[in-house]
Image: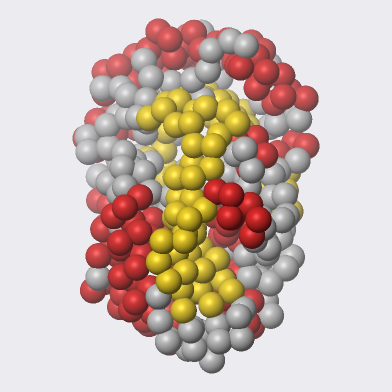
Amino acid sequence: MLIKKFRIYRLQIPFSLPVSHNLADRAESEALLVMAVSPQGVTGYGEGTPRTYVTGEDIESCITAASEVCGQLKNIPALDTTAIETRLDEVWKHTSAARHPSAFCAVELSVLDLHARLSGIPLWNLFANEPCTNEFIYSAVIPMLTEPRLSELLSYINYQQIQFAKIKISDIQNGLKYTAGVRQRLGHAINLRVDANGAFSQEQAIEFLKLAEAENLGISAIEQPAPADDIEAMKNITQEGGIPVFADESFRNENDMRRLIEISACSGFNLRLSKCGGFRNCLKMYQIAIRHGYSCQIGCHVGETAVLASAARHLAALCSKIDFFEGSYSRHVLKEDISIEDVTFGKGGKALLLPENGIGITINYEALERWGTLVHEI
């Protein structure tokens, strides 16, 4: 049974909550949805969320790259695991895929989802006989908000009894004030970490962390304190900051990760499916990090739909050591998701492994028609 065709959609879904951090302000999600279709009409789904400030991709270049990758994968056996993985590896190495990780993520995920659906198994089961876990605890993410939106979000976090939260910051004084205000309103039981998205110099990051400690803010980790390409600063902050430092924008692929590991430039890594080139690349990088004694979190791009959210849950089911898990914000961020199922996490940030075949969701084609545009059929 061969993959008969691919469809590529451009998605633009308004946010119900505008999101701001050091690198961008966003009011809508921009993504591409890829469908891999069998001759019988069974369909697998994949999503990519290109972000110029993370991977250098914009939506146009991502769609072009996805079309190229789809052309290389059409007519491969949809039920032959070895053939699928061999061909995916070849395409990653010999096309523009590696320069467009979001595009490759969307196409690869659609192929893997179709393979799992046709095999009658959930996605994680393509890689293991048993999941490491079937229950997950998500973090809330607190963007840079003004009142009254901040109060509304913090009240909701308290009401939902969320156990972990990440605060976006962009400078020392406002960052300290913002974090202190969040800590005061959420209390000391919640695990709080901060994400600077590369806003600090080495000196500023170390000063921020020392002041935060002096003010007893109880920060558990800091993510990407220095600019993406300043790995020497990342190294020094890791050595002097006193808390775990997670790399995010500083790495996109295995080579970047190995370079950071080689000089001990961080304590852990933020794995994001769309940033890191898809499911299998993320799983491989997770294994490399754990083998070298590093921590991992599974992150997301703001505005991801249920397609990437459900895929990330299958990835987490294969990872026994995850410090933090972000995503499944569907109802909290998007005006409308494109799945029939609601994948938003519940009380305490808890969610379960999706039991159905493939990634475990069903596309709502009426919602897709409202927010998606078919741009290519291959």
Can residue 364 be seen here? yes
Quarter where residue 42 is shown: bottom right
Position of 205 with respect to 111 (left or right) is left
**Residue at 65%, 56% in the rendered image:** 366
Q: Decide which of 255, 328 is in the foreground and name it.
A: 328
Position of 348 with respect to 178 (left or right) is right
The N terminus, quarter of image:
bottom right
Position of 206 with respect to 179 (left or right) is left
Question: Is residue 123 depicted above or below 307 in this figure?
Answer: below
Quarter where residue 344 is shown: top right
Question: Is residue 332 depicted above or below 123 in this figure?
Answer: above
Question: Is residue 200 depicted above or below 342 in this figure?
Answer: above
**Residue at 75%, 36% in the rendered image:** 348
Residue 295, given in percent of the width and then of the height, sits at 47, 46
Residue 236, given in percent of the width and then of the height, sits at 27, 30
The C terminus, quarter of image:
bottom left
Q: Decide which of 293, 46 is in the foreground and name it.
A: 46
Q: Residue furthest bottom?
A: 1
Residue 122, given in percent of the width and then of the height, sits at 66, 71
Q: Decide which of 45, 151 is in the foreground and name it.
A: 45
**Residue at 32%, 24% in the rendered image:** 199
**Residue at 49%, 45% in the rendered image:** 12
